Structures are given as C-alpha cells and as structure tokens.
Amino acid sequence: MNVRWAFTRVGVATGVLMVTVALAACGSSSNNSSSATSAASSATSSAAASGTTTGTTTTALPAGYSGPESHVPTGYGTPKVKPGFKFVVGYLNPNAGVASLLAQQKGVVAEAKALGGKAITYNAVAGPQAQAADFKDLITQGVNAIVVQPQSPLALSPLIKEAEAKHIVIIASNTPADAPSPNLPGYDSDILQGTDVCAYEEVKTIKDADPHAKVVAMGTSLPFPSLQYLTAREIYWAKKLGLDYLGRVDTSGPTPAEAQTAQQSILARYPSANAVMAWFDIAAEAAVATNRASGKTSILVTGQGGDQAAIDEVKAGELLGTCKNQDGEIGTQAVMAAYDQLTKQHLPLPKKVSLPPIAVTKANASSIKGF
C-alpha cells in the first residue's frame, strides 16, 4: 500500500500505517522530533543480545492460496555477519505511538545491533513535512541505509534521488502494498505485509464456517490505495471461493462510531447477510458490538490487523477471525535487505518480499499475542 494506517483505542490523528499515510492514533507527543536511538539502547531481541541475526519468517503461505503474493519471496537471504563491518541504518517511523509500528522499529533496532551496526530512529507523527525533514537529516548524518514508509512518496522524491546519488540503500515498507505494482523509483526493495494473503485468509475463514455464506464487505471511503486494494481483494476472494457476495458498504472514516453506522446500514440494506469482512480490526469490533445490540449475534465478522482486543474477541467466539501482520519481522527483514546490499550478499535483492500474516481463529487465538 502506499499509505499505511494504524489506530489505537485512545483516538485518531493524521499520521501513516496500512498502505502508507497512516491515520495514526494520538498517543505520541513527538512532532518531527529527532528521537534518535541506538540499537544498544532499545534492542529487545534475545537474538540481538547474542549477536546473531534474527531473520526468520514465522508463517508460510496458506494452503490453497494462489494469488499474486504466491510468486513473491517470503524473506531475504539471511546475511552472514562480516566481522568489523560497521553501518548505520535510519528508520523513519510514521508514528511510534502505534504498537505495530513500534514493533517494526524494534525489529530494525535489534537486527542492526545483531549485524554489528546501529539504528537511528525518528518519529514522524507530525506528518509528511516532518518525515521529509527527518529523511534529509539522515542523509546529512551519512547513514548507509534508510527504511521508510512514505507518508507522501511525492514529497520524498527529491530526497530519494539525493540518497541514490550518495549510494544510500532505500528499503520501503509496504509501499506500494500490492505485489503486481512496480516499486517506486529509487527504492532497492519493498517489503509487503501480505495484504492479499490476509484477504484470502478472511474469506477462507468465513467459508470454513459457512460454505454458503452471504457476505458483505465493510470497506472505507478514505482514498488510500492500500485500503481500497484490501477490500477489492476480499471481494475477489469471496467470489473466487464461491461465497454469495451481496455488496459493499463503506465507513466514512476510521472511528468505531463510523463503523457502527456502516454496520447498521449493512443490516438495513442486506437483511439476509450473515457474514461481514471488515477493513480493520476496530471496524470489525464495532460491527460485532452493533450486531449484538441488534440481536444479530449469529453474523460472522472478520477483521485484520492483529489488535489484542480483536484477538480476545476471537478467543471468546465473538469475532470469527482476524490476521496479525508480522510487523516486527518487517523491521528485521528490512535491515537484512540493507545489510545484504551493503555487503554484496544474496544479490540481486528481490524487488519485493511478502511476509504472510498469521491467520487468527478460535483454534489458535490463545497462543497469539496482539498489538
């Protein structure tokens, strides 16, 4: 996606997450502050502490999946540490107050330390101009690589060219979010979070529960390509797997109240619907609450994102399922890619890799920790 969205339960403010401007939750008081941290101060991985690399994807592509991400590698080659090789990687966090993005940052920091380097992190919650200023500062500091989810790819274009001229490795996170689209100019590789796989998993979970489900997509009218891509792929897989797709109702924004309004509209417009595919966990949770208030507790609802509240609802049998993205591993893999490029290992880098999300159902919800 070229905009990523993130939410917390305390509120929402413009920022970046699922495709890559995130409506991120209010929770950080930093502006474009250079909250630079070294790997030594914030690494949390035991692998990092032992000086070994941490890169190993935790899931495989689901059986039966044949979408565009089935043709994309699920990770980079694990680099061999070169003794004495020092490097600095910059990570531009769209909003460090968002748990999933903080997990990605921790992955960057830990892997940089594990490979003998260090990470400098910035919190660009203030917006695209702040992110561009932080990007410029990383170039000025002479970093060797930058990992970024562009809040505004256009705003970063001149800086990407400047970084290219200085041979700085640029790794994108989920920008663009779909496997078929080419990488943005100047980016060495793009790490996908598995949006299409998640859409497939949502639909498969519904089909397993009811092979003849009458399903509605709860999307959003927010104009971000990655979010529109997710809903389009949910609809595609619903039809592909033989469910009875009835239609789509969009939320007008990212809040629970707006999702409740959308679910009320679904109940009114599609009274025969017994399944809803929501575009994000908070929307799914709001749909479950609306159904409960309306006495429609048999309606199956799925979400995506891996929010702990959603996982708890899956465990309780209230929410049918969700997908948890491998955000920490995205950070780890980004540094592995940069290190491979800098030390001439496993080249050429894949243009894209995709880290399949973890499908969360009642069968495994107790063993999955959310954000």
Image (spheres, rainbow, N blue to C red):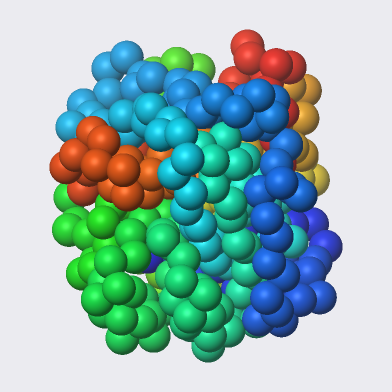
Image height of 369 relative to 351, above or below? above
Q: Can residue 327 be seen here?
A: no
Q: Can residue 181 be seen here?
A: yes
Count of residue discs: 0
Q: Which residue is drawn at 16% across and 42% down?
A: 348
Q: Quadrant of residue 47?
A: top right
Quadrant of the rendering where the N terminus is positioned: bottom left
Q: Which residue is drawn at 46% across and 24% down?
A: 56
**Rendering coords of residue 190 (x, y %):** 32, 52
**Rendering coords of residue 94 (x, y %):** 58, 67
Left or right of 37 in this view: 149: left
Q: 163 or 251: which is nearer to us? A: 163
Quadrant of the rendering where the C terminus is positioned: top right
Image height of 49 relative to 142, above or below? above
Question: Residue lying farthest top?
Answer: 363
Q: 314 or 352: which is nearer to us? A: 352
Q: Residue at x 71, y 46 (%)?
A: 40
Q: 222 or 74: which is nearer to us? A: 74
Left or right of 164 in this view: 227: right
Left or right of 131 in this view: 226: left
Q: Residue at x 21, y 69 (%)?
A: 185
Image height of 181 relative to 81, above or below? below
**Rendering coords of residue 298 (x, y %):** 65, 28
Q: 357 or 249: which is nearer to us? A: 357
**Rendering coords of residue 292 (x, y %):** 76, 40
Left or right of 246 in this view: 45: right
